[in-house]
Amino acid sequence: MVAVAQEGSFTRAAERLFLAQPSLSAQVRKLEQEVGARLFDRLGRRVALTAAGEAFLPHAQRALFEVEQAQQRVQEVLGLRLGRVRLGVLPSVGAHLLPGVLAGFRRRYPGVQVGLVEHNVSGEFERMVHAGQLDLAIIRMPRARSDLCGQTLVREPMMALVAPGHRLAGCTRIGLASLAGEDFVTMKPGYGLRDLMVDMCARAGFTPRITVETGQLAIVRGMVQAGVGVSVLPRLAAGSEGPCLLLAEPYAQRELGVVWRAGEPLMPPAEAFLQMLVGSVCERAGPEPG
């Protein structure tokens, strides 16, 4: 319609649009039927806008402009000049694995925004990824959902945290069972780190006597350093404030991975972030690469 109005002729508009004139005429007639009014007066070989056509034309031009802008934005996303990555991350992981990756990603793709969502339960992240609320999520592996794709990033050892004056403070490696009679400081029920610790203590043959519960890792570490109790945390979450003793049990480790929706390719911004995340973890090669 816009091309016909600009050219004043169906013939010239069809040539400009590389369409057959009958096809263009049929499209205009269909549009006139949809809006319920004649948009052009046919004056022999040329056409002129009716009053309805003059009222409709500015809206058609704006719609055409918006479509062109949308196409341009899509190409900018595909070319990583614009876009967004929505990433879920466990609080105990974000401060250690992500800063370097985020800094590098921002330098390479300054127009792409990265939105972070923190949660303490890997299962909730899996649900959000499947629902399309997140592009990627870093979770504790193995993943529960079979309708997600996943890749292991790192396997890190579990550490026993004790106060500087504790009877085991001078050790570098202990068996988990040696903590069976201790008071434990840990996260509140529902936190993945608490579930991980309780499960490992059960495999070692005891139920931990939990005396302090909190929702903050920093409080767990502070309480341990003050001598309130001991704790068991993955190496990335353990910090470096005091004695951290490696656990001897072969199962005493946490496996972290990244998941995304199965069955469809990631958008270029998310794919680029995934590749940079995996590459960064492999380069660090601190904890055993997945």
Image (spheres, grey):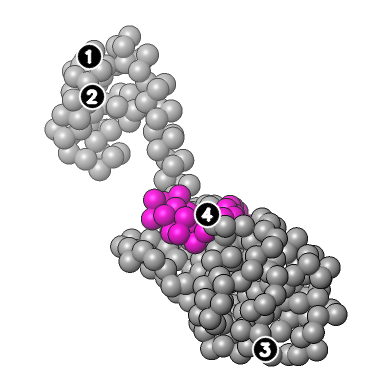
What residue appears at the point 42 percent right and 63 percent down from the top-left corner? 260
Dot 3 falls on a residue whose secondary structure is strand
Q: Depth-wise, is mark 4 or mark 2 nearer the camera?
A: 4
Residue type at the position of mark 4 = Arg
Q: Does the residue at mark 4 contact the one at mark 2 (Cβ under 8 Å)?
A: no
Instruction: State which quadrant residue 57 falls in.
Output: top left
Q: Is residue 246 above or below residue 52?
A: below
Q: On the rendered image, what quadrant is the N terminus found in?
A: top left
> Is 16 covered by the magenta stretch?
no
Circle 3 packing at 10 Å, graded few (<14), some (14-19), many (20+), is: some
- Determine the CA span between mark 2 and mark 1: 8 Å
Return the disc, 4 or 2, that comes first in the chain's sequence: 2
Q: Is residue 45 above or below residue 230?
A: above
Identify the disc placed on residue 86.
4
Percent position of residue 261, x then y: 38, 61
Q: Which residue is mark 3?
A: 174
Q: Which residue is mark 1?
A: 36
- Determine the CA span between mark 4 and mark 1: 44 Å
Q: Depth-wise, is mark 4 or mark 3 nearer the camera?
A: 3
Return the disc, 3 or 1, that comes first in the chain's sequence: 1
Return the disc, 4 or 3, that comes first in the chain's sequence: 4
Return the disc, 3 or 2, that comes first in the chain's sequence: 2
Give 80 or 194, whichever is nearer the viewer: 194
